Image (spheres, rainbow, N blue to C red):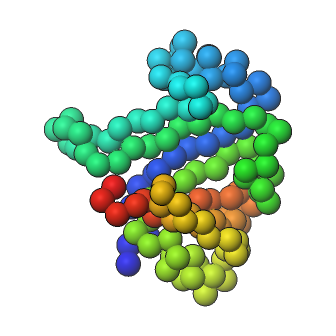
Amino acid sequence: MRRVTGIGGIFFKAKDAPALRAWYQRHLGIDVQAWGGAAFPWADGDGKPAAGTTIWSIGSAEGDSFAPSKSSFMVNYRVEDARALAGLLKAEGCNVLDKIDESEYGVFAWVIDPEGNKVELWQPPAGQ
């Protein structure tokens, strides 16, 4: 089983999320949407569209979506099988959170790295 197959998203917190989003939009040209982030579509080596996107999002520093981590960021990694990888990581002694979520967006599991950062494992829905 391949473990990580790509980056699904980069999420970080800001003291003033709307102002920081506006800065990125104005100065770096990121197409920030009303939900607080942007979706970057994938392309192959020739620039042709490929299945998948990478999400970039800024949230409020007050949120607890990265708990139990106290870090201001979280990386979402694409994986082939979130449940199997979470089990494998747990067997290897990693700090895997017990919660696994499944929705129309796919299967999500989490592990805490040795520095205390929450890492999200995302298995996209079939066909994505």
Total labels drawn: 0
65 in relation to 125, above or below: above
Residue located farthest toward the left when viewing the structure as drawn: 46
* Quarter of image, res 87: bottom right
Residue located farthest toward the top when viewing the structure as drawn: 26
At 47% from the left and 17% from the top, the residue drawn is 29
Residue located farthest toward the bottom when viewing the structure as drawn: 91
* Quarter of image, res 17: top right
- In the displayed structure, does residue 48 sit left or right of residue 53? left
At 39% from the left and 44% from the top, the residue drawn is 53
Q: Position of residue 114 (x, y in %)?
A: 71, 66
The answer to whether residue 92 is seen in the rendering is no
47 in relation to 114, above or below: above
* Quadrant assignment for the N terminus: bottom left
* Quadrant assignment for the C terminus: bottom left
Q: Position of residue 28 (x, y in %)?
A: 50, 19
- Please tell me which residue lies in front, 73 or 39: 39
The answer to whether residue 67 is seen in the rendering is yes
Q: Position of residue 50 (x, y in %)?
A: 25, 45
- In the displayed structure, does residue 4 sit left or right of residue 89? left
At 54% from the left and 14% from the top, the residue drawn is 27
- Please tell me which residue lies in front, 105 or 114: 105
At 49% from the left and 80% from the top, the residue drawn is 84
Q: Position of residue 77 (x, y in %)?
A: 50, 57
